[in-house]
Amino acid sequence: MNFDIGYHVVARDALNQENMFDAEMSVVEFLRQVEQMGEIPYNVTVHGLDTYLQGAESPEELCSFINRIFSERVNFLLNKNPIVQFVVDDVEFWDEPVIPNDDGDINLNMIFQGSLEPEGPSWHYSRLNITS
């Protein structure tokens, strides 16, 4: 797999161990670092996006919250130019990329404003600037 600068949502099964980055963070820590304009490694594997969204009382509100962070900190992120892998248990693509959930699929384009595109089986990519 060749990862470009930006966001990658990849199913764990589609990713070989050698394709995962050495720097790893939880989704909560990653969002905290972005919001506070803290330290973000150039190549980072982020765990827990799926369980974070699935465990939310309102996944739609949480998606909007994450979208707001990415949108407000776009200049910070563009300065850092990270390659961010969100490793999830499963990501499906029907009309749009979704994380399966018992209460209804969670539409990932709510986070990435429709910029998430398929790159391969169970692998989706979005540029850092999700607002343009």
Image: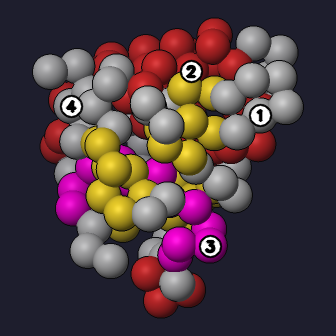
Looking at the picture, how far across and down is residue 128, in whole percent?
Answer: 25, 39
* Distance in Å between CA atoms under marks 1 and 4: 27 Å
Of tags 2 and 3, which is closer to the observer?
Answer: 3
Question: Could you tell me the amino acid type at mark 1?
Answer: Asn
Looking at the picture, how far across and down is residue 80, in whole percent?
Answer: 23, 49
Return the residue nearer the eye: 107 or 27.
107
Q: Name the outermost residue toward the front.
A: 94
Decide: few, some or many residues near mark 4? Use Cα within 10 Å; few <14, some 14-19, many ≥20. some
Residue at image coords 46%, 75% = 21
Residue 101: which numbered mark, if any? 1
- Return the residue at label 3: 13
Return the residue nearer the eye: 24 or 20.
20
* Labels 1 & 4 near each other (Cβ < 8 A): no
Decide: few, some or many residues near mark 3? Use Cα within 10 Å; few <14, some 14-19, many ≥20. few
Question: Could you tell me the amino acid type at mark 4?
Answer: Asn
Looking at the picture, how far across and down is residue 84, in whole percent?
Answer: 39, 55
- Return the residue at label 2: 63
Residue 7's place in the image compared with 107, above or below, is below
* Labels 1 & 2 near each other (Cβ < 8 A): no
* Labels 4 & 3 near each other (Cβ < 8 A): no
* Distance in Å between CA atoms under marks 2 and 3: 24 Å
Of tags 1 and 2, which is closer to the observer?
Answer: 1
The range drawn in magenta is 4-15
Question: Could you tell me the amino acid type at mark 2?
Answer: Cys
Question: Could you tell me the amino acid type at mark 3?
Answer: Asp
- Return the residue at label 4: 129
Instruction: Look at the numbered disc 3 and give the secondary structure of its residue.
Output: helix
Question: Can residue 96 be seen by looking at this rendering?
Answer: yes
Sequence-first disc among 1 and 2: 2
Looking at the picture, how far across and down is residue 42, in whole percent?
Answer: 31, 63
